[in-house]
Amino acid sequence: MKRFALALSMLVFGLTFMASSASAEAAPPQPPRQSNGLALTPPMGWNSWNKFGCDINESVIRAAADAMVSSGMKDAGYQYVVIDDCWHGERDINGDIQADSKRFPSGIKALADYIHGKGLKFGIYSDAGKKTCAGRPGSRGFEYQDARQYAAWGVDYLKYDWCSTGSQDAKSSYETMSDALRASGRPIVFSLCEWGQSKPWLWGETIGNLWRMSGDIYDGWESRDGHENGMTNILDMQVGLESHAGPGHWNDPDMLEVGNGGMTFEEYKSHFSLWAVLAAPLIAGNDLAHMSKETKSILTNKEVIAVDQDALGVQGSRIVKNGDDEVWVKPLEGGGRAIVLFNRSKETHRIGVTWEALGYPASLGLSVRNLWDHKNLSRTKGSFAADVPPHGVVMIRVEA
């Protein structure tokens, strides 16, 4: 009798196991993750970190919002005012993240309302680890709770860093916050600040809207004196990544240093032109409330910005490199091209490009416009060449 009961029990177990296995096999596959539909052109805005670091408060952020409007940057297309690290206080007894009450006595919701009242959008910062890079509370284990808080505050953009992450897997960590943001019920642009260590351009398209592909930018022409990631060093890292960018998902060579003092006027023009031809996010990082006319003239050049914001959404590529002479090209909606003739040397160089290199027949006559001089040049066949100043660019737009 005992043997019969044992056999019956084993039979029931076997049938149950087979049924559960068949059920698992029959379960429909999970639908592929879809993009969030945001940032169909590269985001434009301002972030506090490059100029202010941790030395921020609500007055600094409000002044930046005011200046974004009064300087003409809003009219030029800039939208997001983003607080970087050091805004955090502690979590309350329910685990909800709070602002530093000394730096932001009015609270984040009031600050977001002020920025929205200017016709702008509001961004905030957190980290995938337990702590932010400045040691404030990170979002690890609080992703959904933080996303709900951001939505309640009126956040439109989240920069999500990668400090204090230990052995965390980057893709799954960013997926978790991506899902949390979607579940919050508010459209929030998601900026992955993973520094390129896990090649987010290979997996980030349906997780976030932009991803860093290097460490923090250094306000200098090139790396030196122990500072990594000078402007030209980060530029070189972009070569070969073009196919991974497009509407809603952008390679991010980090925020702009224009106006922060580490480069010359010509070098900053090069910086801005090259970021535009790369279809990079244009996130200013200077003191907007106290910028020079020269800095303003760079950041508000609508013709260069139009290249960055072109609806075709193609990242430009380097098609010529001859020592210090380079040609970068970005295809545009309607069949035109934006071209940056780039001189890395310390002397003026004459740099040219042929129509064949651009994919046009040599016999085709093209209109040529200089985007920094704001002048139409002679209609041209076959090729174009110009004298390019040291560490400078000539940026043109050609169309049939």
Image (spheres, rainbow, N blue to C red):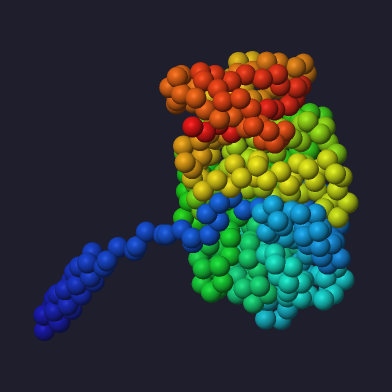
| Residue drawn 52% across the image and 33% down it | 399
Q: Is residue 158 above or below residue 264?
A: below
| Residue drawn 77% across the image and 57% down it | 68
| Residue drawn 23% across the image and 70% down it | 23
Q: Nearest the camera: 392 or 162?
A: 392
On the image, which quarter does residue 105 sit in?
bottom right
Number of numbered discs visible in the structure rendering: 0
Tell me residue 301's x, y (percent). 71, 43
Task: State which quarter of the image contains the N terminus.
Answer: bottom left
Q: Nearest the camera: 158 or 86?
A: 158
Q: Is residue 389 above or below residue 125?
A: above
Answer whether residue 387 is visible to the viewer in this image.
Answer: yes
Residue at the far bottom: name it.
1
Q: Nearest the camera: 322 or 335?
A: 335
Residue at the far front: name it.
378
Q: In the drawing, does residue 217 fall left or right of residue 41?
A: right
On the image, which quarter does residue 104 sit in?
bottom right
Q: In the drawing, does residue 239 fall left or right of residue 32?
A: right
Tell me residue 341's x, y (percent). 64, 25
Tell me residue 178's x, y (percent). 53, 62
Answer whether residue 228 is visible to the viewer in this image.
Answer: no
Q: Nearest the camera: 84 or 341?
A: 341
Q: In the drawing, does residue 348 fall left or right of residue 17?
A: right
Q: Is residue 60 above or below residue 316?
A: below
| Residue drawn 58% across the image and 20% down it | 384
On the image, which quarter does residue 133 sit in?
bottom right
Tell me residue 81's x, y (percent). 72, 60
